[in-house]
Every structure is written in C-alpha cells, then in structure tokens.
Image (spheres, rainbow, N blue to C red):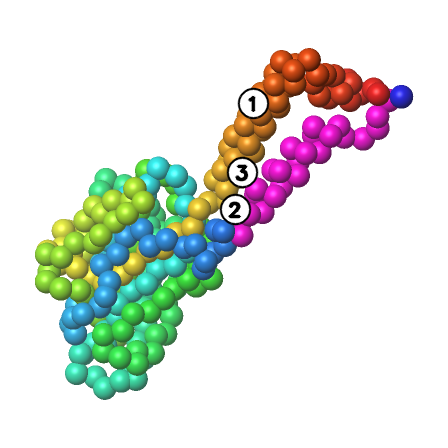
C-alpha cells in the first residue's frame, strides 16, 4: 500500500519550521522588540543647532553586520528663538541619506516637512516607521546619514551635554561624524557640535527571521536525529528491535 500525501518527515519539518517562524515574528514585532542602536538622548540643552530650508545638519553612522528595518527616529527639538513661549508650532524634516565620499548623497526616505507642536522647550519627538514615505531596510555594514532640516522659519535641533559629547552606539552600529551644510546639502563641512539629541531604533529585517527559523529547525532536527540513533543503539544493545525499520518503511512510501 502506497501512502498518499506528504510523508510524516516532511509534515513534521513543516510544522516545526512554521511554529519557529511564527514565534520569531511574534518576538520581533515592531514596537515590541525594537532596539535603540545609536543615541545621544536626552535633550538637556535649551539651545542646539539651528536648521532651516538651507541650513541642514547630518549625523553619519554605519550599520551592523545584519540588515535591519528602521523602526523609529527620535529627535530632540527646541523652539527658535528659544525665548518663545510654548506650545509653539514649527516645521521639521527628518530624512535618511546614502553616503558617498564621506558626505550625504541621495535622499532614501523622508518625513517631508511636518508640523511639530512643541509643548516643552526641551522636548523629544518620535517619528515611527509610518512617518516616513516607505518602509526601509538598511543594508549591513553600510554608512547612512540622518539629516535634519526645516523651512525658512527654522527650528533648533536640541542637544545633550557639551559640544564634544558623542553618540553611543550598540549592536554593531558605529558613529562616524556630524556634518553641517549652509546650502541645502550641496556642500558639507565638519561640525564641532557632536551632541545633537536623537535616537535611532531598528528591528530585524524579515528575511533574517526566516534564516533564524531555518537555523533553529536544522539544529532541532540534528538533535532529534542524534537522540533517535542513541535510543536505537540502546535498544539494540538490549536485544530489542529498534524503531528504524518502521521509519524506513514509510520513508520509502510503503507500509
């Protein structure tokens, strides 16, 4: 008699893979397991760097060894002038650029100009993945630039500590430098102030979760095989029939 449909072997592997992938996806849902990979928060200074439609500022960083999806960008923002009473509404644009020759090159995604109502003079504001034009996966070991700008009314990119304070990076990410431009990104120069307040959070890229699931299933199946061989050897040493024959019969498609 020939057994129809998938073999028990295939069915079991499929169940284990699907269950493992579902568990990994649940553990890494955006907003649940997002990881801050580079930051200078909190926003402790009343002043900061003035950004406008022509005055841009950029923080350059390099990603870790695995692709990741951008989950959110948090920036510290202050009114300009700093004497303005709150609440106070101004415009800000948060963008991610590629890097070429050590400078921001091509805009990859952006919030566009958005209105931010500042309820405090030293506030922090979150732009999650839905704030940007498209979901974005950052390649591994690749430099990018976080760029802030505004409209002609200007806004202050807040700061933390003294000018020489630098961002803290983790998960294989690295801080490179801060740059500034006075001509809307045409030319860039090094900024002495490296303490502008921000945080970038990421989540694992979906294909990486699938690879993790495959690795987990492979490890589990290898362990299962070792255990079956061990049990078979124990039975044979006692003069008892092992389960190998029964398994072999359905593997060949017959009973």
Judging by the rendered image, the residue that carries numbered circle 2 is 24
Residues marked 3 and 2 touching at CB (< 8 Å)? yes
Q: Secondary structure at mark 1?
A: helix
Most foreground residue, 148 or 177: 177
Going 26% across and 70% down the picture, which residue do you hit?
77
In primary-sequence order, the first of circles 3 and 1 is 3
Q: Is residue 221 visible?
A: yes
In 3D space, how far apart are the residues under numbered discs 3 and 2 (Cα atoms)? 7 Å
Q: Is residue 85 magenta?
A: no
Q: Which residues are magenta?
A: 2-26
Q: Horizontal placement of 112 versus 247: left or right?
A: left
In 3D space, how far apart are the residues under numbered discs 1 and 2 (Cα atoms)? 25 Å
Q: Position of residue 87 (x, y in %)?
A: 30, 84
Judging by the rendered image, the residue that carries numbered circle 1 is 226
Residues marked 3 and 1 touching at CB (< 8 Å)? no
In primary-sequence order, the first of circles 1 and 2 is 2
**What secondary structure do most residues of the magenta stretch adopt?**
helix
Most foreground residue, 222 or 80: 222
Judging by the rendered image, the residue that carries numbered circle 3 is 213
Going 49% across and 51% down the picture, which residue do you hit?
27
In primary-sequence order, the first of circles 3 and 2 is 2
Q: Position of residue 5 (x, y in %)?
A: 81, 30
Most foreground residue, 35 or 253: 253
Residues marked 1 and 2 touching at CB (< 8 Å)? no
Point out the residue furthest to the bottom here.
85
Quadrant including the N terminus: top right
Q: Is residue 7 magenta?
A: yes
């Amino acid at each position: 008699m020939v057994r129809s449909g998938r073999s028990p072997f295939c069915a079991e592997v499929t169940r284990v893979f699907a269950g493992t992938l579902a568990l990994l996806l649940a553990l890494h849902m955006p907003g649940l397991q997002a990881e801050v990979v580079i930051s200078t928060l909190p926003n402790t200074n009343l002043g900061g760097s003035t950004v406008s439609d022509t005055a841009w500022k950029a923080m350059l960083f390099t990603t870790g060894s695995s692709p990741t999806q951008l989950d959110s960008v948090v920036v510290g923002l202050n009114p300009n002038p700093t004497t303005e009473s709150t609440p106070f509404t101004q415009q800000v644009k948060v963008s991610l650029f590629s890097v070429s020759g050590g400078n921001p090159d091509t805009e990859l995604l952006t919030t566009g100009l958005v209105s931010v109502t500042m309820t405090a003079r030293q506030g922090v504001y979150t732009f999650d993945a839905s704030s940007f034009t498209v979901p974005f996966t950052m390649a591994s070991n690749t430099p990018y630039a976080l760029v802030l700008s505004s409209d002609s009314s200007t806004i202050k990119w807040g700061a933390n500590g003294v000018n020489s304070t630098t961002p803290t990076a983790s998960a294989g990410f690295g801080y490179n430098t801060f740059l500034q431009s006075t001509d809307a990104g045409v030319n860039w120069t090094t900024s002495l102030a490296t303490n502008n307040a921000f945080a970038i959070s990421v989540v694992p890229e979906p294909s990486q979760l699938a690879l993790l699931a495959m690795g987990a299933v492979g490890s589990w199946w290898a362990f299962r095989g070792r255990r079956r061989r061990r049990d078979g050897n124990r039975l044979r040493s006692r003069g008892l029939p092992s389960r190998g024959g029964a398994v072999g019969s359905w593997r060949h498609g017959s009973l």
